[in-house]
Image (cartoon, rainbow, N blue to C red):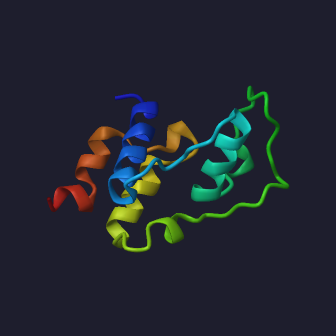
Amino acid sequence: MSSVDMWSTGCIFAELFLLRPLFCGYSDIQQLQKIIDVIGLPAQEDWPTESPTPYPANWKSGNTLNQLLPNLHQEERDLLLQFLAFNPSKRVSAFEALRHTFLAEQ
């Protein structure tokens, strides 16, 4: 599976708990802001150099995942954050996800 598939898996994983879409923006910028609100502002070195949007250093970084999903156990939260790693090269692979403690115990 590609890293974008793992991102999608993370969105679906969160949406199973939320019972609604995790990121529901109406424009590229609004979508990006919603992502940053949930997972936090990525490190500047993780920002794509080819992005038409410059690194948003002045954007407020919410990291509202705990507010959105307060009942997640630590293992669930950890796996979700690995699915939603901003940098695709740092995102969990399918093999790694299956070996994560949350899924390995199931």
* Residue at the farthest right position: 58
Q: Is residue 91 visible?
A: yes
Using residue 18 as the reference point, say whether residue 64 is left or right of it.
right
Q: Is residue 71 above or below residue 8?
A: below
Q: Is residue 46 visible?
A: no
Q: Which residue corresponds to the image point at 28% horizontal and 56% vertical from the top-left?
A: 100
Q: Which residue corresponds to the image point at 75% horizontal and 31% vertical from the top-left?
A: 49
Quarter of the image where the N terminus is located: top left
Q: Which residue corresponds to the image point at 56% horizontal and 44% vertical from the top-left?
A: 24
* Residue at the farthest left position: 106
Quarter of the image where the C terminus is located: bottom left
Q: Is residue 21 above or below residue 5?
A: below
Q: Nearer the viewer, residue 88 or 9?
A: 9
Percent across and percent down for residue 39 are 58, 56
Q: Nearer the viewer, residue 12 or 90?
A: 12
Using residue 99 as the reference point, say whether residue 85 is left or right of it.
right
Percent across and percent down for residue 78 are 40, 62
Q: Which residue corresponds to the image point at 43% horizontal and 45% vertical from the top-left?
A: 11
Q: Quadrant of residue 12?
A: top left
Percent across and percent down for residue 37 are 64, 57
